[in-house]
Image (cartoon, rainbow, N blue to C red):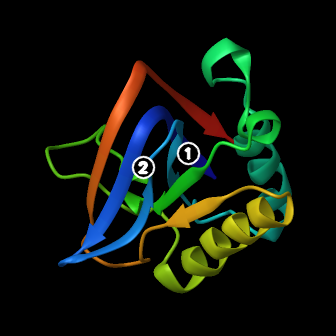
């Protein structure tokens, strides 16, 4: 599993004319990609790392501040561009594998007490964010 995590002051995701998830206060925008070899065993670790990452202001985390997370599935995080001009998506999990794992990470975050908003899996989404810093990092498990 791979997540690009941005510290934001606000963020939202829209599908068509509908806002499916939004945070209007400081928190984290999480773009979450699932690898073909990922399974449920990685879910608790990813949820813990996202929730407890001390990357908010004053080295705080969502766990310590109650800051929200906006989680958006992003299969393109596993695009391979080493050959040619067209990315290869062979490392990205198929939707029928990825969707339950993205849902499991969101559920695990909520079980930890996190406030979580989401996009809509498989939809064409418009993601807006106001980065804070900017501060963005890659978390892999």
Q: Nearer the viewer, residue 113 or 15?
A: 113
Alpha-carbon span between mark 2 and mark 1: 8 Å
Q: Position of residue 13 (x, y in %)?
A: 34, 62
Name the mark on residue 12.
none
In the rendered image, residue 19, in percent from the top left (x then y), is placed at: 32, 71
Give the residue furthest to the bottom: 96
Dot 1, how many residues are within 10 Å of its Cα: few (below 14), some (14-19), or many (20+)? many
* Residue 109, percent from left and from top: 75, 59
**Disc marking residue 3:** 1
Q: Position of residue 85 (x, y in %)?
A: 13, 44
> Foreground residue, 48 or 139?
48
Question: Which residue is pictured at 32% across the width and 35% down the height?
Answer: 130
Q: In which quadrant of the rendered image does the C terminus lie?
A: top right
Dot 2: what SS?
helix
Quadrant of residue 134 in the image? Answer: top left
Q: Marks 2 and 1: CB-CB under 8 Å?
A: yes
Is disc 1 placed on a helix, strand or loop? strand
Q: Which residue is mark 2?
A: 77
As drawn, the residue found furthest toward the left would be 85
């Amino acid at each position: 599993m791979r997540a690009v995590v941005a510290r934001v002051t606000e963020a939202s995701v829209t599908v068509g004319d509908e806002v499916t998830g939004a945070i209007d206060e400081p928190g984290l925008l999480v773009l979450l990609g699932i690898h073909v070899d990922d399974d449920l065993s990685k879910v608790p670790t990813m949820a813990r790392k996202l929730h407890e990452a001390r990357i908010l202001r004053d080295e705080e985390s969502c766990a310590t501040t109650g800051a929200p997370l906006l989680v958006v599935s992003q299969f393109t995080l596993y695009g391979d561009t080493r050959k040619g001009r067209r990315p290869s998506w062979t490392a990205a999990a198929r939707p029928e594998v990825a969707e339950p794992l993205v849902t499991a990470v969101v559920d695990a975050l909520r079980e930890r007490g996190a406030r979580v908003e989401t996009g809509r899996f498989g939809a064409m989404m418009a993601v807006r964010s106001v980065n804070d810093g900017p501060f963005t990092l890659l978390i892999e498990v």
